[in-house]
Amino acid sequence: MAVTQGRRRLIAAGVACALMGGLAACGGQSSEAGKDGVVTITVNGMPPKTQPVDRKYFEEDVKAFEKSHPKIRIDAREGQMDPQTFSAKLAGGQLEDVYYVYFTDPAGLIQRGQGADITPYVKSMAYYDDVKPEFLKVFTGPDGKIYGLPNGQYSLGLVYNRDLFKKAGLDPDKPPATWEEVRQAAKKISALGDGTVGYADYSKNNQGGWHFTSWVYSMGGDIAVRKDGRWKAAFDSEAGRNTLRMLHDMRWTDDTMGSRQLLQIDDVQKMMGAGKLGMYMAGPDNIPTIVKQFERKYEEYGVAAMPGGRATLGGGNGFMFNPKASPEKIKAGIEWVQWKYLNPDRTALEDKRASGNGVPIGLPLDRLFTGQAQAEQDAAHAMYSNVPQGNYKPFVEGNARLEQKVEPPNAQQIYTVLDGVMQAVLTKKDADPDKLLSEAAKKVDGILATVK
């Protein structure tokens, strides 16, 4: 359920790029280099032709990188990591030297020996120490070694209509910080009448299970835990029951979620775009969609951190390296990933380029760094910002205090099961939370039994 790389690049205007120039030279020449000392690496993640602006930027960056790194050539390919074909590509020698993964992929790839150990090459990278530890942890094996680098990140929060907050007598600069505050705010917003809904949530096409997961995380629980080498369902818990009780009470006791249920993301965005919804769980990337599709203004919307103050569902993407690649190719690949994605020094350049194409600059996306590196990136975004950054302050400040938890293994299969839990509690007033959770846990245990 991650934001696509293409959309992220357009919206965030790039989390760019550069590595210390000496990295590629530290291994000298090898048989992988041509007679002129040039190393060619294959990389995926190139946007398809159906995304012409993204692809144009990508091709421009390849040319700029090769000009500044004359001993490296990029053989760029479309596509990302496909679990269905990955092993066959690796075995057949068709896997790219540098390949794109989601945060849910690395643990299994590392366990199966399908990613190269890059630990010897990353410690001296510029800004390596500034990358948030929780994102590097995604690419860290049980042996403590590093097997990849992040390049994009998202986390869920609370998107809300600032105008409806004002009409309901709520302070739009102080959005709800707990689920009880969400419940009380939803009551006031629903009281405005005329079909206005206080809070809405998804419950189908795996999106309900996705949101249930974030609810449980926010309550301090887990969806799955690994114990004694095996994964087991963990949501038949107090956190799971608190989630269902809150949803039930908002839906049936307070009547603040509206009578129409079995919603998915486009339904809820339409409600928000029509000015008839106060709040829903989402990431900041939802706001440009609402603004563009429904001809709204950025000033109308704010984003708060996930209520509860404990954790939020986060995800993202990054790059790993072919375990069959030579050290020279791995070093060159790290050069490329760092230059293209992980240096705040290029943020201003990319923001300027993107701002000429009507791209929103200044949304709180892809915050991969800490300290001075993030401060430099924030300053660059502020220089070219064309959205009201103050509206996202509650998200930025609150999110920094939350644990970012990734999706469980076999997430999509699990979400199918959890959709049923969300649907039941939102469509049946007499739904039994204990029974729902117990039956769902048994099904999820079966799904997790296949995880190695």
Image (cartoon, rainbow, N blue to C red):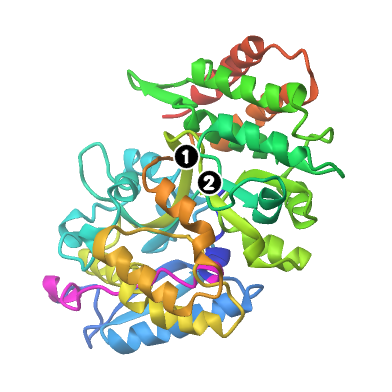
Name the residue that disc number 2 marks. 156
Residue 331 horizontal side relative to residue 86, left or right: left
Q: Which mark is residue 222?
A: none
Q: Compare marks 1 and 2 and give the one earlier in the sequence.
A: 2
Q: Quadrant of residue 310?
A: top left
- Find out whether the residues at labels 1 and 2 contact each other: C-beta distance under 8 Å: yes
Residue 49 horizontal side relative to residue 12, left or right: right
Q: What kind of residue is marked 2? A: Leu
Q: Between residue 353 and residue 227, name the one nearer to us.
A: 353
- Please report the residue visible at 43 percent of the width from the left and 36 percent of the height from the top: 311
Residue 51 horizontal side relative to residue 57, left or right: right
Indicate whether 22 appears above or below 43: below
Give coordinates of residue 57: x percent, y percent: 51, 80
What secondary structure is the stretch in magenta mostly built from?
loop
Tag 2, which secondary structure?
loop
Name the residue that disc number 1 marks. 312
Which region shows up in magenta?
Answer: 10-28
Q: Between residue 275 and residue 140, name the one nearer to us.
A: 275
**Residue with the most extreme front position:** 169
Q: Quadrant of residue 122?
A: bottom left
Residue 22 falls inside the magenta stretch? yes
| Real-space CA distance between mark 1 and mark 2, rounded to the nearest whole angstrom | 6 Å
Tag 1, which secondary structure?
strand
Give coordinates of residue 303: x percent, y percent: 55, 52
Residue 92 seen from this side: no
Q: Residues within 10 Å of mark 1 (few under 14, many from 20)?
A: many
